[in-house]
Image (cartoon, helix red, strand yellow):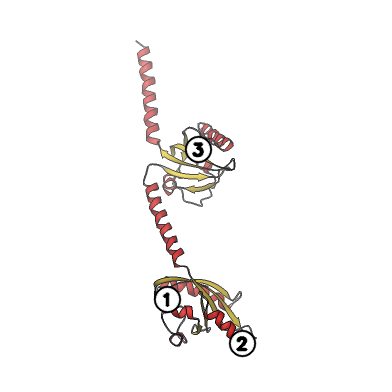
Amino acid sequence: MVENDNIYRELVENQQDYIVKFSPEGRLLFANTAYCELTGKSKEELIGSIFMPVTERQYADVIATQMVKLFRPPFACYVDQWMQTKKGMRCISWSARSLLDGSQSVRAIVAVGRDISNSKFQEKAIQKRDRELMLVVESGKQMYYSHTPNNVMNYVSPRLLKLLGYRLHTGKRLWTDYLSDNPVNKEGLERTKREIATGRREPRYRLEFVTGNGVTIWLEVNELPIVKDGKTVAIVGSLIDITEKKEVEEGQLEAEILLKGSSSQF
């Protein structure tokens, strides 16, 4: 029995992961060598101290919410904890499980932690890059969108939604729900159908949309089918508001008609 205990202790003490055991009140009962090295404290200093101390309320609230699960089925939880270590602030991902007594009360909790700081830093870097990219994308004339071959929207530019006077999740799932009943839209829809069927890009075209206030606007569409394994899986594209341009063109056309009518009288 003593030999088995020594084997288990060696296994625990030589793990690179951080292994701890703490009371239901949150005081450390055991910490392996890796956790001691992480904190820069000895076992004697750690035993009896509060486990998972956090200073920022946002982390405290999240951890508290998750750790409630340790006192009811499934008596287990996962927590990401940012903590000050010898290496600076590090993010430790903990997998914790409760040890129950005969009356199903929690007598202690064991947790295994792993440093996931690098992946968290990469995630933040990607998020920052995505925000910067979105800022560039949203600052131009073009407004972007994507939809499935069944016309279900995957993405709609925030500026496009604002222009149309809608918010997400307002019951409009299909991009065609935003179109007016103008017969000219039929030609544009036919082009999209051809793109889906052939996987080949069609020339730019125009569509008339209806805003949430019932105002009609004109948008120029430039789209591209995304093809995978010979099948169109999505349509991505950009839109430009050409409402004023369309009004000018219509005004010019009316003027030309009037000029022709006037010249024919002489």
Q: Residues within 10 Å of mark 2 (few under 14, many from 20)?
A: few
Residue at disc 3, secondary structure: loop
Which numbered disc flags the more N-terminal residue, 3 or 2?
2
Q: Which residue is mark 1?
A: 54
Q: Is 167 or 17 nearer to us in this picture?
A: 17
Q: Nearer the viewer, mark 1 or mark 2?
A: 2
Residue at disc 1, secondary structure: loop
Q: Which residue is mark 2?
A: 3
User: What residue lies at 56% left-to-right and 83% top-to-bottom?
Assistant: 9
Please indicate whether residue 204 sits to the left or right of residue 228 in the image.
left
Q: CA distance from mark 3 to mark 2?
A: 80 Å
Tell me the kind of residue under disc 3. Answer: Ser
Instruction: Please tell me whether residue 219 is drawn above or below residue 54 in the rendered image.
Output: above
Q: Which residue is mark 3?
A: 180
Q: Quadrant of the N terminus?
A: bottom right
Estimate the x, y position of residue 71 in percent, counting from the top left: 57, 79
Which numbered disc flags the more N-terminal residue, 3 or 1?
1
Q: Are marks 3 and 2 in contact (CB under 8 Å)?
A: no
Where is residue 163, by image quadrant?
Answer: top left
User: What residue lies at 41% left-to-right and 80% top-to-bottom?
Assistant: 40
